[in-house]
Image (cartoon, rainbow, N blue to C red):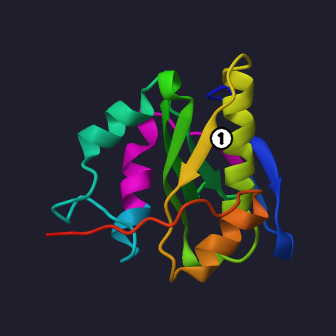
C-alpha cells in the first residue's frame, strides 16, 4: 500500500471510512485518539509509546501502520505492526477503534488490509501475522477471527 493511497472500507451502519498508511505527520492524531481513550496507551503512562518513538516507527520503510478515517478526515482507528523480515513474522502491536465507530467492521477490515499490504510489499515472502490478545477479551478475539485469523498457542505473561 502506497503512503498516499486510500482504500475505501465497506462498513456497517452506512459510515464512509477510508484506510491509508500512517506517516510521521500523523503522530499527533494518533496520540490524540489515545489521550481520549483510557484503554489506549498514550504518552502519559510510563510504559506507553512516546511521540518520538511513534514518529520513528511511522517512518519505517518496512513496518506498516494503518489509520482509519471518517468522511471528515478524523482518525477513528489504527492498526500498528512491526515486521521481522528475516523471521517471516509480523507482530500486530495495536488495533484500536474509537467507541463511536466500533462494531462496524473497521478493525477486522484494517487487519485484512494489513495482511494484503504485507503480501503486496513482499511478494516473495510469506509472513506469519501474530497478534496477542487477552483470553478474556472475547470481542478482540472475534475481530481477529472475522479477519481470517485463528487462535494459536495460548501464552501466559508474568509480570514482576
- Which residue is situated farthest in the top direction here? 124
Left-right relation of 45 to 137: left
Q: Residue at x 53, y 80 (%)?
A: 137
Crowd band around label 1 with a 10 angstrom C-alpha radius: few (<14), some (14–19), many (20+) = many
x and y percentages locating residue 10 in the rendered image: 85, 59
**Residue located beneath label 1 in the image:** 20
Q: Quadrant of residue 159?
A: bottom left
Name, please, the residue furthest toward the front. 153
Q: State the quadrant of the N terminus.
A: top right
Query: In this picture, is 129 found above or below 25?
Result: below
In the image, taking residue 52 as reference, residue 120 lies left or right, namely right
Q: Main secondary structure of the magenta part?
A: helix
- Residue 117 coordinates in the image, percent (x, y): 70, 33
Q: Residue at x 84, y 72 (%)?
A: 12
Residue at disc 1, secondary structure: strand
Q: Is residue 109 above or below residue 38?
A: above
Is residue 132 a member of the stretch shown in magenta? no
Kindly indicate the quadrant of the structure image that contains residue 42. Answer: bottom left
Report if residue 104 is visible in the image: yes
Of 108 and 13, the residue lying toward us: 108
Q: Please name the residue shown 26% across and 69% down the image.
A: 158
Magenta region, residue range: 19-32
Instruction: Locate the C terminus and report the quarter of the image it occupies.
Output: bottom left
Where is residue 50? Give x, y as percent. 24, 49
Residue toward you, 93 or 150:
150
Give percent across and percent down for residue 84: 47, 30
Residue 5 seen in render? no
Amino acid at each position: 500500500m502506497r503512503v498516499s493511497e486510500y482504500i475505501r472500507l465497506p462498513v456497517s451502519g452506512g459510515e464512509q471510512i477510508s484506510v491509508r498508511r500512517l506517516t510521521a505527520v500523523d503522530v499527533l492524531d494518533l496520540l490524540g485518539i489515545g489521550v481520549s481513550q483510557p484503554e489506549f496507551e498514550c504518552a502519559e503512562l510510563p510504559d506507553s509509546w512516546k511521540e518520538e518513538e511513534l514518529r520513528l516507527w511511522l517512518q519505517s520503510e518496512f513496518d506498516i501502520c494503518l489509520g482509519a478515517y471518517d468522511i471528515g478526515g478524523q482518525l477513528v482507528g489504527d492498526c500498528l505492526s512491526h515486521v521481522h523480515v528475516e523471521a517471516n513474522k509480523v507482530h500486530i502491536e495495536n488495533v484500536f477503534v474509537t467507541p463511536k465507530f466500533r462494531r462496524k467492521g473497521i478493525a477486522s477490515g484494517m487487519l485484512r488490509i494489513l495482511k494484503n499490504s504485507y503480501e503486496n510489499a513482499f511478494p516473495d515472502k510469506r509472513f506469519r501475522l501474530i497478534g496477542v490478545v487477552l483470553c478474556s477479551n472475547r470481542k478482540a478475539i472475534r475481530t481477529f477471527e472475522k479477519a481470517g485469523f485463528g487462535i494459536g498457542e495460548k501464552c501466559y505473561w508474568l509480570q514482576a
